[in-house]
Image (spheres, helix red, strand yellow):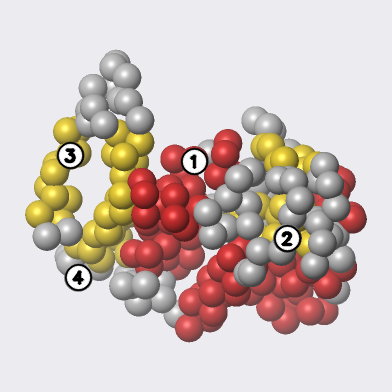
Amino acid sequence: MKAQFSAALPTHLSPERFARVAITAITRTPKLQQCTQESFFKCLLDLSAMGLEPDGRRAHLIPYGRECQLVLDYKGLVELARRSGDVVKIHSDVVCENDTFSHNMGDITEHTYDIGKDRGAVIAAYSQVTLKNGAVQSEIMSKAEIDAIKNKSRAGRSGPWVDHYNQMACKTVFRRLTKWLTLSPEIMDAVSAAEKTEFSELRNVTQAQTVSIDPFNRIEATNEEEVSS
C-alpha cells in the first residue's frame, strides 16, 4: 500500500511513518486484524488524504464487527481547519447547568464558571472561531441536538462517545461550524468521507458492542454477539 499512501499523503507525512503508525494501531487494537482489509485500508487512505494519523488523539480506528470505522476527534478537525490559513483562533467548550452562559443571535457573549465548584451536568456545547479578517463565527448546540447526532453514529454507545463525551460534543458542534468556513475542496472531501464511515447505515446488532479507550489510547472492542448484515 506504500505507493497509494505516497500518492495521497501531504509532504509533511512520509508513507514509511504512516505505515508505522498503522502497524502501531493494529498492535494497540488487535481486533482490527479481524476487520476486512477493504474497510481497514479505506480508513487509512481517508486519513492519508487528510494528512492525519490514527493515533487515538486526532483520529480513532474502531473495529465494528468486521468493519473498521474511522472516527475523527475534535483535535483532528481543528488541525484540518487551521491548515486553511483563514482561522486565527478556535475555542470550543461544553456548557454545564451551573455555568454562567449567554449568547445573542448566535454570538457568544459570556461563558464563565467557578473552576473550584461542580459545574453540574452538560446542557450544551459551542464553538467559536476568529478568522483572519477579524470576523467571528459561532455555533451553539443543545445537549438534545448533540445526542441526536451521537445516536446516529455507529459508535454512539461506545468508544469516544462514552469515554470522552465532552470532547465529542465539542467536535460535533465544531464540525457543524466548519460548514461555514472556507476549507479546501480536498479537506472537505476527506471530512465527508470520514462522516460517511462514521454515520453509514447501521446494521442489525443483536447486542451492543463494547468499546473502551484506556489512558494510553489503546482501544479494545468486544462483540458479544455476531453482527448480521
Task: Report the side of 48 relative to 66 (left or right).
Answer: left
In the depicted view, which residue is nearer to us: 186 or 73? 73
For the point 27% across and 59% down, the residue is 139
Task: Name the secondary structure under disc 3.
Answer: strand
3 or 2: tag closer to the N-terminus: 3
Q: Distance between the residues labelled 3 and 2?
A: 41 Å
Residue at the disc numbered 1: 165
Q: Are marks 3 and 2 in contact (CB under 8 Å)?
A: no
Residue 164: x, y in percent?
Answer: 53, 39
Task: Name the secondary structure under disc 2.
Answer: loop
Nearer mark to the viewer, of 2 and 1:
2
Residue 134: x, y in percent?
Answer: 17, 65
* Residue type highlighted by circle 4: Asn
Answer yes or no: is residue 6 visible.
yes
Task: Name the secondary structure under disc 4.
Answer: loop
Where on the picture, by quarter, is residue 37? bottom right
Q: Is the residue 135 above or below the residue 90 in the image?
A: below
The image's mark for residue 204 is 2
Nearer mark to the viewer, of 4 and 2:
2
2 or 1: tag closer to the N-terminus: 1
Residue at the disc numbered 3: 101
Q: How far apart are marks 1 and 3 (CA)?
A: 20 Å
Q: Distance between the residues labelled 2 and 1?
A: 24 Å
Outermost residue on the front side: it is 206
For the point 31% across and 72% down, the residue is 180
Name the quarter where the N terminus is drawn: bottom right
In the depicted view, which residue is nearer to us: 88 or 190? 190
Answer yes or no: is residue 219 visible.
no
* Residue type highlighted by circle 1: Tyr
4 or 2: tag closer to the N-terminus: 4
1 or 4: tag closer to the N-terminus: 4
Q: Residues within 10 Å of mark 4 (few under 14, many from 20)?
A: few
